[in-house]
Image (tube, helix red, strand yellow):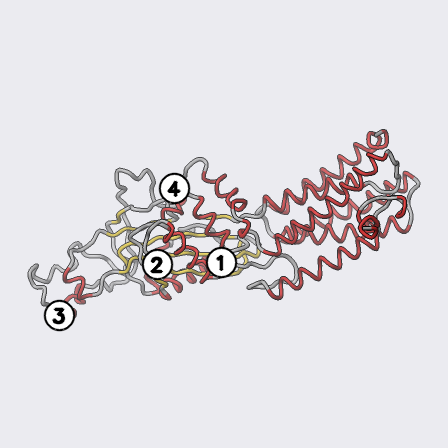
Amino acid sequence: MHRLLHDFIPHRHNNHRPYLTRHPGLATILVFALSVQMTLNTFFSSSPQILGFATNIYQQELIELTNQKRIENSLVTLQHSPTLDEAARLKAIHMFDKNYWAHVSPDGVEPWHWFGVAGYSYISAGENLARDFDTSSGVVTAWMASPTHRENLLYPQFQEIGMAVVNGVLDGRETTLVVQLFGTPTPSPSLALETQPQEETVTVAGAETGLPAQAGPPTATPLPTPISTLAPTDVTATPELVLVEEPTATIIPTITFVPTPTDSVALGPSRRTVEPSSDLQVALSVFSNWRSFSISRLFMLSLTSGLMGLFLLDVAVLAQRRIKRENAHHLVHVGVLLIILIGTLVNANGAIL
Amino acid sequence: MRFLKHHLFQYFLILMVFAITVTAVVAPIATGPKIFYIVIALGIYFFWAVWHHWEDHTLTLATVLEYLILTLILFWLLINLAY
């Protein structure tokens, strides 16, 4: 108790100056902070850095959290597709290479292009993007807070998922990009014989969920009647016959979207309609789940709050006892730390698209 | 309270410096300029503190060391914020 008094509270035994607010005490705090951060970066980070926070975002964890949300909403879970992983990775690398943060690149490359490059043929597809988050949980929480992204996560027709978490430099900043792709693969040739051609659906960032497209997969020019060479009753035809009609051309499709009456949105970030409150909801979503904060950020918040509390306690006790101390202006330190604390909280969330 | 009133303007100025710096640090700009702003702000903070105590005739080696270490702690916090 006496030690506590000596370290934290101004008292006549410490000449009304707690040990931790003196330079040896502050040096101890600094060494402690640096040691803890080095330990955290070494053991709890996927991409340790010398300074600053490292990200704690993991591909498998993102998939599990996405499936968890689908289970909570009574939907089937998504199967992990390595092909979609590759498409997502290509998209992320392209964003870093061309230095853009958008669904459609400045030179007009659409998300669906990467599905084709990776060799994924689909009848419906979607894309969610995120950047600058600390944790996997923070990413999924933010997506769920955005009505448009949430629609993608909970779109019943999607069957497969692919993810990429890629570090790089975007706009001069070290950034972790997360690309999440959804897809419903085209039926196998044998199934294609038994089913009618389906209307294709492409979605971006949840905003376009349910928008039927008239065009085909990115690697192909879909034909109006994909099995037109087969007689309608020829259900015993061999799969090879179908493959004749399987689009293999490398023409990049012009995707035309025909919104359903319930959709008030159009494709593309620039034309996306977002609920007015969604940006604020996304920004605040990090506070709804403490797991959205990385351990490093929680430590930083704790240390800033602790230091602020220490100086505030000092000021309050001295004021209450009406003791004037001339060589320490801890009220300024409280103010500075408060500004940093607010900055840390504001900066706790990343951006989604 | 009289002491506080006497130094209020100086306190306000240093808090404004940090408010602007933190705003720049959390803004979506390149990391290089952020580090530059941090170094400038902490330089202002340190020299403001030394000058402030010199003006009050309370400047000692212990005070300089105290502000030096506080500056390093703030540097660590702001750099973490910048990344």
Mark 4 to mark 1: distance in Å?
23 Å
Mark 2 to mark 3: distance in Å?
30 Å
- Chain ID, mark 3: A
Camera-near label (4 vs 3) is 3
Q: Which residue is mark 3?
A: A238
Counting residues from the start of the chain, the first of labels 4 and 1 encountered is 1
Q: Which residue is mark 1?
A: A96
Q: Which residue is mark 2?
A: A78
Describe the element under mark 1 as helix, strand or loop.
helix
Residue depicted at x 48% and y 40%: A281
Q: Whole-percent x and y of residue A121?
A: 28, 61
Mark 3 to mark 1: distance in Å?
44 Å
Q: Are marks 4 and 3 on the same chain?
A: yes
Do the residues under discs 2 and 4 have CB atoms within 8 angstroms?
no
Q: Which residue is mark 4?
A: A272
Counting residues from the start of the chain, the first of labels 2 and 4 encountered is 2
* Amino acid type, label 1: Phe
Counting residues from the start of the chain, the first of labels 1 and 2 encountered is 2
